[in-house]
Structure formats: structure tokens, C-alpha cells
Image (cartoon, rainbow, N blue to C red):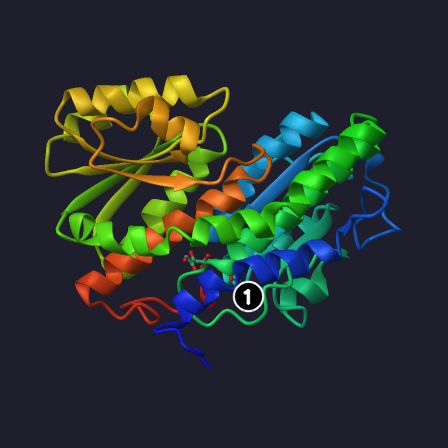
Amino acid sequence: DKGNHRHFMQKEIFEQPIVVAQTLRSYLQRLEGQIVLPIPEFDLSGIKRVTIVACGTSFYAGMVAKYWFEQFARVPVDIDVASEFRYRAPVMEPGGLMIVISQSGETADTLAALRHAKAEGQTIAAVVNVPTSSMAREADLLLPTHAGPEIGVASTKAFSCQLAVLAALAANLAKAKGRLSVEDERALVRHLGEAPAAINGALAYDEAIEAMAPLIASARDVLYLGRGTDYPLALEGALKLKEISYIHAEGYAAGEMKHGPIALIDDAVPVIVIAPSGPLFEKTVSNMQEVQARGGKVVLISDYDGIEAAGEGCLATITMPKVHPLIAPIVYAVPVQLLAYHVAVAKGTDVDQPRNLAKSVTVE
Ligand code: F6R
């Protein structure tokens, strides 16, 4: 049932404050200021290396998590798409941890990678949304997302819930490694706990995004740029746009523009720049200005401070609530999803059932 929404995708985008809160409830003890995983029997302190494998949007959640695991826990992370991982003779540390991420828990390539790594002696943790799925059953450790059934083919609420679980896991790994003080843990719990309200704040920009959608709907190509954890978000934004609006889109690390893709820039190519204010902001803005200097039309997604500092000369701006960097990817996922959604609606495509795509990909 779509309720009063036009599409399941729209309904699922708007469910995110509730389902992220629902998911966080089983990972955070807010009163105690503690992060607790639903796998109490497993000791994370011995983990020396993590391998993350997934496909599509779930893979981009994994890319964000790599930044977190390395930054907070100082544990090296190897990450790959499942269809490549299996066929490249990956080196797995004995006793290592492999994390598979999947909404459906049935994606054939991810499941095959899980089985391969299990046979190689890895401990498998599964971040999955369907608790009865093959991955949930075959994994050693289950880290569920509680997004509820996702009907729209384009994944939205599963992604934000995956990020919430992975942030909790990264913080817990940091704690197990003695890298998170009691105060720091309490602060992280507070920041994560603020995510649902911040997502609500992001959703308030829905109408403004709808109003700018026609500017993008007429484009043939669109670029998305971001740095740090906003780089995987740029990739996710491009994937969302291409799969439901059929507009060609690419995501790039903002600093890579000058190594080739900037040649594509002219006034017919909208460039979506994802840049919350923070340590990476200045660098991303200078990449954005390189684009503008070549006539590129920029849509800047930032917070109030960021828009104040760099919004002038943009085709459009999208103002997000000011949030802690840990939850920024969860919050900034929302305008990226809404933009793809409204552009697709403006183009009149079948948003919930895009051509050539299936919700669960059970062939390799
Ligand atoms: C994109 C999308 C796909 C899936 C991918 C993995 O919107 O939905 O890219 O993310 O097929 O599916 P799961 O997460 O079920 O393994």
C-alpha cells in the first residue's frame, strides 16, 4: 500500500526517519550512551582486517563504511563488488572478518562471495534487511537492518539503514580496539541518535527539489562529485538517477575531475556537488569552481554555512541541516534520492519498475 504517496519509492524515502530510528534502536542504548551489537557472543578485538563485499547501492554503503572503519578503528578494509571479488583470487587473512551487505539477502553474486569466503575460513557478518534470506541464514553473525519491506526497485531506505548499522559496527570495532573513550562513545551515540530528526530536516526540502527537477530532466548527461564519504554518495546519486530516469550519470571523486572528466563539462552538463561544510569543504569547492569556470551548471548540496560560502553562481542549491560528519552520509542520501525521484517523475518514467531491472538479482 502506497498510502498517500504516488510511488513506493517516494513512500520509502519518506519512511526513512522512522526506519532509521527503528534500526538504531537495536544498536544504541541511548540512556547509557553505549553502542551494543546484537552479536554479544562475538569478540571484535582480534579483527585485523575487514573485507566488504556487496553490489549496487549496498556496495556504496560499504564504501562509506570503509572510511569509517579505517578512521575510527584503524582497521584496514578491502572492498569489492561481489561479481569481481570471487574471480580475482582475493587474499583473505586467516580469521578475518567478511561483511556482506544486501537488502534482499539473495543477490546471487554476493551470496556466492559469502560462500567462497566462508570456505576460506572467514567469519561472515551479514548486514541484511530480509531476516529469513539465504545470507541471513548462512552468515555467522547477523546484523539486521529494520527498514521493513522495500518494494521500489531503486533502493532508498535500505541504504540509510545499512549506513546506520555500519556506523554502529565501526564504532563498536573502534571500542573493541581500545580507540573509543567512554566520552567519545557517548558523543557518537548522541550524533547517531540525531539522524532521524536530521533526515526529517532533509525531507523538508522535497518541494524545492521537485521545483528544480525540470532543470535536470532535460539533460543528457549529469555528473555527481563528492570527497571522502561523499564520494560513494556521488556514485549512489548517479546510480539512482540513471536507473530510474535513464539519464546518463557518473559519479566521481571531486579531485579526479581534472584527470579527465572535466573535458565533458559544458553548459549542458549539470554537475551535482555534494559538500557538507567541514574539513574537505574547501577542496571540493575549488573543484566545483573549476567546473564553473568552464561553464558547468552546478547544483550544490551543502548546509547553510556551505551555501553561504559557495552558493553564489550555482544553478541551484539544496540546503541540508548542519550535522555531525558521522551522520552526514545518511542525511545527504535523502536529497540525492529525492532529486532522482523527481527527475524521473518529471520525465514520466516508471519509477517503481524501471525497465530491464529486477528487485532481487538472483543470477550471477
Ligand atoms: C539500486 C539497487 C541495486 C541493488 C543491488 C543489490 O537502487 O537497488 O543496485 O542495490 O542489486 O541488491 P541487494 O542489496 O538486495 O543485494
Q: Determine the residue positioned at 51% across, 41% down.
A: 329
Q: Is residue 182 left or right of residue 336?
A: right
Q: Name the residue under label 1.
A: 104
Name the residue nearer the viewer: 275 or 235.
Answer: 275
Which quarter of the figure is the C terminus placed in? Answer: bottom left
Few, some or many C-alpha atoms within 10 Å of disc 1 (few <14, some 14-19, many ≥20)? many
Residue 204: x percent and y percent? 42, 53
Q: Can residue 86 be seen in this view?
A: no
Kindly indicate the quadrant of the structure image that contains residue 70. top right
Q: Is residue 265 visible?
A: yes
- Amino acid type, callout 1: Ser
Residue 296: x percent and y percent? 16, 30
Q: Determine the residue positioned at 70% across, 46% down.
A: 120
Kindly indicate the quadrant of the structure image that contains residue 134. bottom right
Residue 6: x percent and y percent? 34, 74
Question: CB of residue at label 1: within 8 Å of ligand 1?
Answer: yes
Residue 119: x percent and y percent? 70, 52
